[in-house]
Amino acid sequence: MLTTLTKLSSTAFLLLAGDPFTSTQKFANDTIPKIQLIATAVFALVLAVTGLVYAFSGQELKQKIKKKWVDVGVAIVVVYGATMIITWGIQFVQNSGFK
């Protein structure tokens, strides 16, 4: 009985000893810049391709491309806004939130 209690207490100590947010924080710190880099590359490619098509197209296609550029602009704001909100949330939690 005593050895079982000793094992349980040492197991509980081992489970509580580590910081549970270390791996999550490391994952977030590694992933957010990668997401921003991929998003930037995709947005640059989309803008370059639509810019070339816009330059060599007729009026009807130019109107459609202008509408897509607004969509791309909204997507850029959403992607970078989301990563900034995640970064802010991590910093907020690390600094103990509302004191």
Image (cartoon, helix red, strand yellow):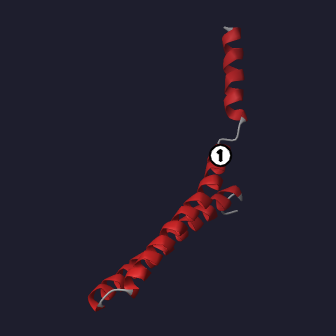
Quadrant housing residue 91: bottom right
Label count reads 1
Question: From what the image shows, is residue 20 above or below residue 68?
Answer: above
Measured from the top left, where is residue 94 in percent x and y? 69, 56
Q: Residue at x 68, y 45 (%)?
A: 22
Image quadrant holding the C terminus, namely bottom right
- Decide if residue 78 is in sight here: no
Q: Work out which residue is located at the far top of the displayed protein and give it.
A: 1
Question: From what the image shows, is residue 50 above or below residue 40?
Answer: below
Residue sitting nearer the eye, 63 or 87: 63
Question: From what the image shows, is residue 17 above or below residue 49?
Answer: above
Residue sitting nearer the eye, 78 or 42: 42
29 sits left or right of 83 in the view: right
Q: Work out which residue is located at the far front of the displayed protein and give it.
A: 56
Residue sitting nearer the eye, 49 or 20: 49
Q: Residue at x 58, y 63 (%)?
A: 37
The residue that disc 1 covers is 21
Q: Residue at x 51, y 73 (%)?
A: 44
Amino acid carrying label 1: it is Phe
13 sits left or right of 87 in the view: right
Residue sitting nearer the eye, 34 or 16: 34
Q: Work out which residue is located at the far left of the displayed protein and give it.
A: 60
Image quadrant holding the N terminus, namely top right
Decide: few, some or many residues near mark 1? Use Cα within 10 Å; few <14, some 14-19, many ≥20. Answer: few
Measured from the top left, where is residue 96 in percent x and y? 69, 57
Quadrant housing residue 38: bottom right
Callout 1: SS: loop
- Decide if residue 87 is in sight here: yes
